[in-house]
Image (tube, grey):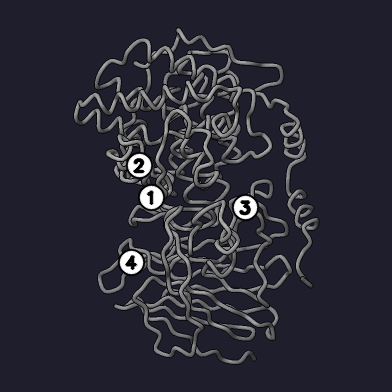
Amino acid sequence: MIGEPSKASLYLGTVSHLKPSQVGYRIWRKLGGKTRLKPGYVPRPDAAKADVGRIPVLPELDFDAAFLGRFDVSAIMLDRVSLLHHEEPIDWTRSWHDDLATPLWRFNLHYCEYLLPLAKAFVDSGDVRYLEKGQQIIGSWIDSCPESKGGPAWDPYTISMRVVNWLAFLGEANRRQGLAEGFVRKVNESLAEQYVALANHLEKDLLANHLFENVKATVILSEYFKDGPTSDIASKLLERQTSEQILGDGLHCELSPMYHKVILEDLLRALSYASGNDRYDLGFYRKVLQRMLNVVFSLEGDGNRTPLFNDSGDNVSKSPSGLLACAEKCFGLVPEQSDRFPEGGMYVLRSNVEGRALKVVVKGGALPPKYAMGHMHNDCASLEAFLDGVPVVVNCGTFAYQDPRRSWFRGNSAHNVASVRSTEQSQCWGRHRVARHCETAVQLFREDRIVLKTADYKGNEVVRTICLEGDSLTIRDECKDERAPLASYVHVRPPVRCPNPDDFVASQADYAEDFGLLDKVTQLACFGTGKVAVRIRFGQPVEVSRVPQRNRK
């Protein structure tokens, strides 16, 4: 098609953002090379030094109510597992290697998060059938997934997630009843093997949250096995990655509220294991945790849904309440509210509408690091609005990574943004790739308004003003080129009313609060030349109208 970028140009644009080391490590890993913690170093864990009694028990995370609500314990007992809103019957002797659902679903099967609701049922009831089912699942994985088989079971990311969930299951179950020595020995031997495999295959080509997960798991296993030499290396890596990935205002560098919470949990767990180890500068980490907690509390503390910016969904991370409770119990930290996170490009406008709290979360002024744009969406200068914590004006979410709709969910029309000449903000392509990208800056921020400038990858500039006025929110978009065709998208959860339906092109758009769960929202597209303004009045129902424009002087 004329005007469509070639695949070669997209690849070149994407590769140009990467660090040279990423390119080298990607080629090396494809050739079967190892990417070790440290050149020439291999951990030598002694399973005899492991002690389940030393596992930090964190029920605020392990038994987080929102997390547990994703699982049906009775179904797991009948060998049916639901992950990301998709259920599969499981034969624990072979399903680990079956071509089930999607690659992301199969990864989640290997994470073994569903062990924790079994642990909760056992702790609460004392019924050993729940314990035995968890032990059966772990034992079947060990028997069915030798390292020689490879596949998702031995991907560094799945190892990083699984070992933490196995240890949490052991710790919680052991607190209720001592575990059989033979079972514990078998698990420890497998954990030692996974530990060595992970330390040999860090995801240095992907970096960002993948490498953080690897390092977190290495820290935890080095503490579990009392492996001092590896702890020396892992502690330095954790501090280095924390300094690189957590911005000065507390946001995780990939600018996804969901991944921010995942990384916050990682730090809480890793530091709980490392408590008392003077290799870890607790003063440094307390400051980092405080800033990260402030982000979660400010964006979600008075809401009931993860803000849907970049790749985000509500059924992946632990809940804000669980994370905040764990931080307070383990580290004595209490979050503070802020409405401005300039390094991470998150801003909050607040108001009161007839006794209801209105919160508008705006994203702009920052992009993920160029080497880690795989979870990026075209949502610069987008917003979400919440009334008493309930989302009213929304972005459309993520839904899935391996799905034909992936490109649409990342695109302009799935977000509350403006499009000039039907041009996407950035060239988001494939599952996790970005070639040429937009630029964004905040020009003004105060408690009732924010002004942002965004230039798409072709250079089309839009200045957006978002303003709270009484019970209304006004969004004004103005192009640098006053003759340019402009579209402004707004997505509203029903009910919604348009006093003049001719102001908009209305349709039903796909909407995914959770990964794997599809719903619909009302999409309103307002078209104009050079400038467009939309007013959202937060009544009952929500009312959306076009604001008449005065000609430029």
- Tell me where residue 86 appears, x and y as whole percent: 42, 49
Label 1, label 3: how many angstroms apart (C-alpha)? Answer: 30 Å
Q: SS at mark 2?
A: helix
Label 3, label 2: how many angstroms apart (C-alpha)? Answer: 32 Å
Mark 1 — residue? 297
The disc, 4 or 1, on the residue closer to the chain's N-terminal end is 1
- Amino acid carrying label 1: it is Phe
Mark 2 — residue? 324
Mark carried by residue 431: 3
Mark carried by residue 387: 4
- Amino acid carrying label 4: it is Leu
Label 3, label 4: how many angstroms apart (C-alpha)? Answer: 33 Å
| Quadrant of the rendered image containing residue 76 | top left
Residue 537 visible to an observer of this rendering: yes
The disc, 1 or 3, on the residue closer to the chain's N-terminal end is 1
The disc, 2 or 4, on the residue closer to the chain's N-terminal end is 2
Q: Are marks 3 and 4 in contact (CB under 8 Å)?
A: no
In the rendered image, which quarter contains the N terminus?
A: bottom right
